[in-house]
Image: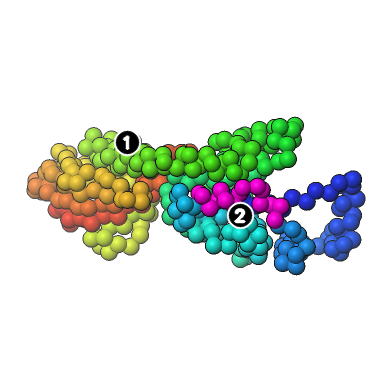
Amino acid sequence: LSFTIFDFIEQASASTIADHLIQKFNINYEDDPVCLVKRKRALAVDMVVNGEVDLKPLWFKGVTSSIRQLEKVLGPECVGLCTSNLRPIVNATVEAGQLGDSFLGGKTVQEDAIDQSTGLAQIKPMPDLYLMALKKLNIPSECVVALEDSVVGVTSAKRACVGTVLGVLNRADNHSTESVEVEAALLNAGADQVFDTTVAAIEWIIASGTTQHDVLSTLMQEKEAVVRQYFDGVNKKDPEMMASCFSEKVELRDMCGPSKGEPRHASSKGMADRCMEFLAAHPDCKVEFQHAPICDREGKWVWCHWVESGHWTGESLGIAPQNTVLDVGGHTRFLVERQQDGSLKIIKQVVYRTFCDWELSL
């Protein structure tokens, strides 16, 4: 959920308002932009903490009870808050809505994304806040629903690969020309649907809640399919098929090898080339599963037990074949995640295994 303070100033031109603010807050046009941002933050916090801003109107009719109901349906730890506002403003706003004990899925605010070198926050439309929020929720991003009332918010959620992004209007007249334009802008930014109110959007989530298990089940099957495709590529000796299963940068940890589990990195092509070097030494290699690829309960890691059989009859990396039997096995965990283009790729691989004669001779 995202909160924004709307101030409606009537019967004044933009220039009049600007002049008033410049005089009231002693703003110098030549001030450093970073200083201006920090001053704006401090002023906003002071206004809220000192009670100069009434936060109760932000809680549209029925929102508090809807959030309570959402927590009952999904579990309180599955509802979080992700906002570009500052923590004192967020805390005051949440208290005004009588939800001080809510959002156990984590509150992610502007201070969490401040770049220490510049003092500026990496806030929406950048994905940083949502990426942090997703980590706190510890739920696959495909199963997460974000509610946003702005284009920058929708953009941020989409860039973080949130599964479903709902736009909300929350306007006095949701059928006015302005509302129609805002709805179009939210959809154009990537919102999957736009609702008249936050309450209506939450009701949709609750009605769809029974299908979230199906969403996770489907996601798990898709991740398992990626791992199966990788092993199919090995058996078919198809480097392009193997490479297509990996992200552009892959972390590899060989827990039993000379590296002793130290992280190493390779490209998707590098991962395929590594396999092809092994297959050049063992042309008749065949990989079979003792335990087929299966996702963990959280839908994150895919693991499997495998065995390789064949013979060392080919030359590879300048090492002559010894015609010995290939009979090795291992356990591999694959971290498969959604990429910016929507595809699922292996980004991390952790291997426990035995070694063949060719590998030992390297």
Task: Give the magenta part as a residue range.
Answer: 56-70
| Precedes in sequence: disc 1 or disc 2 | 2
- Residue 260 in the image, given as x and y percentages of width and height: 27, 64
User: In the drawing, does residue 68 fall left or right of residue 42?
Assistant: left
Q: Which of the two residues, 79 or 109, is positioned nearer the viewer here?
A: 79
Residue 77 magenta-highlighted: no
Element carrying mark 1: helix
Secondary structure mostly seen in the magenta stretch: helix
Indicate whether 342 appears above or below 306: above
Looking at the rendered structure, the number of numbered marks drawn on it comes to 2
Residue 224 spot, x, y in % from top left: 30, 42
Is residue 303 rendered to the left or right of residue 338?
left
- Amino acid type of the residue tagged 1 in the rendering: Met
- The disc label shown at residue 241, or none: 1
Which residue is labeled 2 in the image?
83
Colour basis: rainbow
Q: Name the residue located 50 percent from the left edge and 59 percent from the top edge.
A: 104
Whole-angstrom CA distance, mark 1 to mark 2, is 41 Å
Q: Residue 5 in the image: x percent, y percent?
A: 72, 53
Specify the quadrant that holds the C terminus.
Answer: bottom left
Q: Is residue 105 visible?
A: yes
Q: Residue at x 41, y 39 (%)?
A: 211
The answer to whether residue 151 is visible is: no
Q: For this rendering, which residue is in front, 307 or 75?
A: 75
Q: Quadrant of residue 232?
A: top left
Asked whether the residues under the numbered discs 1 and 2 touch, taking CB atoms below 8 Å apart as contact, a structural biologist would say no
Q: Quadrant of residue 27?
A: bottom right
Q: Amino acid at mark 2?
A: Thr
